[in-house]
Image (tube, rainbow, N blue to C red):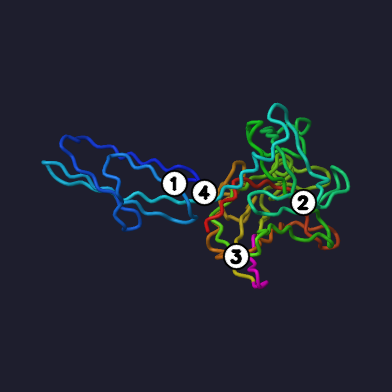
Amino acid sequence: MEVNLGDTIILAPKITYNYDALYEWRKNGILLEESGQILTDTATNLGSIEYFFKVTTPYGIDSMYIPVDVIILANFDELAFSVETDTFNVGAFPDNGFTHKGLFFPNTYTNDTIWTGFGLSNIGVKSSDYEDITPHSVYNNQDQSDYFLLVRLPNGLESSPSIISFNDGKDHLLKSVEINNTTLGRYLMKFGTDHYERMGGSGSNLADWCKITITGITTNGQTTSSIEFFLADYRFENNKRDYIVEEWTTIDLSTLGEVNKIQISISSSKTDENGNGITPEMFCIDNLKVFT
């Protein structure tokens, strides 16, 4: 079970027989005053809570543990500027970026085509028709009230990783994030164009790949560890196992440890005539969860 910081927690275990029953509740091993079947509590601190419930009747005793994770959820819906139309915002932002749930997302903007960092969108297009595709859409049937991040890292030697940082200057434990391809990114990797060869090549025999690397950095500037997530992977001997990500996929971030920043980069097996990596340049992020 997962709840947001400050939410009300209501636990109501199902009981098949509750005649003349006595109830006991414990929270992280500490006995609570609550003596009823339903427990109401408030999520006041980030982290894991272990509730214990016991029922005693004339016919015996039954008990169960109920784990609850208290998180901060950055789902970007509070930043919505329209819930009635498909829209996007990739800059310019007043502070060269924007803050959400105590996290800063940088943005460098020239125009809607030339920008880097993070933008916002609620556009979902699940189509393989190139004429239907907007570069600011996720490959998903998206509700217009459900906003997500666009991440743009242009190809070229001068492209730098994008960094998400905590504003409080402290280290935190991240739980997970959801990632998906843009509709255009999925199209380029699956079908290709005159300027972008499809993943695997014309015969799907090339061991191509495109991946995101997420690296944790502490307040002291130390790197903790990195996580790789493949937006597309055609390295399998059996071509039937080759894939391109086509849905929101949850990535566990807890292995990064406690960090103040996460650095996000994109790379690919494909290169241009100068040996520089060629990628779809954009992907999507949603539901970033902070654990402690």
**1 or 2: tag closer to the N-terminus:** 1
Which structural element holds mark 2? strand
**Residue at the spot of label 1:** 42
Magenta segment: does it hold 219? yes
Location of mark 3 (residue): 171
State the image coordinates of residue 34 (x, y, percent, origin top left). Answer: 30, 45
State the separation of the CA atoms marked 1 and 3. Answer: 24 Å
Front disc: 1 or 2: 1
Query: Residue 6: where, in percent of width, then height?
Result: 51, 46
Which amino acid type corresponds to the residue marked 2 in the rendered image? Answer: Gly
Q: Residues within 10 Å of mark 1 (few under 14, many from 20)?
A: some
Mark 2 vs 4, N-terminal side: 4
Comes first in the chain, label 1 or label 3: 1
Q: Amino acid at mark 3?
A: Asp
User: Disc 1 to disc 2, how far (Cα)?
Assistant: 33 Å
- 55 sits to left or right of 282: left
| Mark in front: 1 vs 4 | 1
Distance (Cα) linking label 2 and label 3? 21 Å
Nearest the eye: 34 or 12: 34
**C-alpha span from label 2 to label 4:** 25 Å
Q: Amino acid at mark 4?
A: Leu
Amino acid under disc 1: Thr
Q: Please tell me how crowded label 3 is: few (under 14), some (14-19), or many (20+) other residues with Cα within 10 Å.
A: some
Label 2 CA crowd tier, 10 Å (few <14, some 14–19, many 20+):
some
Mark 4 highlights which residue? 5
Residue drawn at 83 percent across, 43 percent down? 194
Residue under label 2, please give it.
97
Q: CA distance from mark 4 to mark 3?
A: 18 Å
- Expressed as whole percent of the image width and height from the top left, the position of residue 238 reads 56, 51
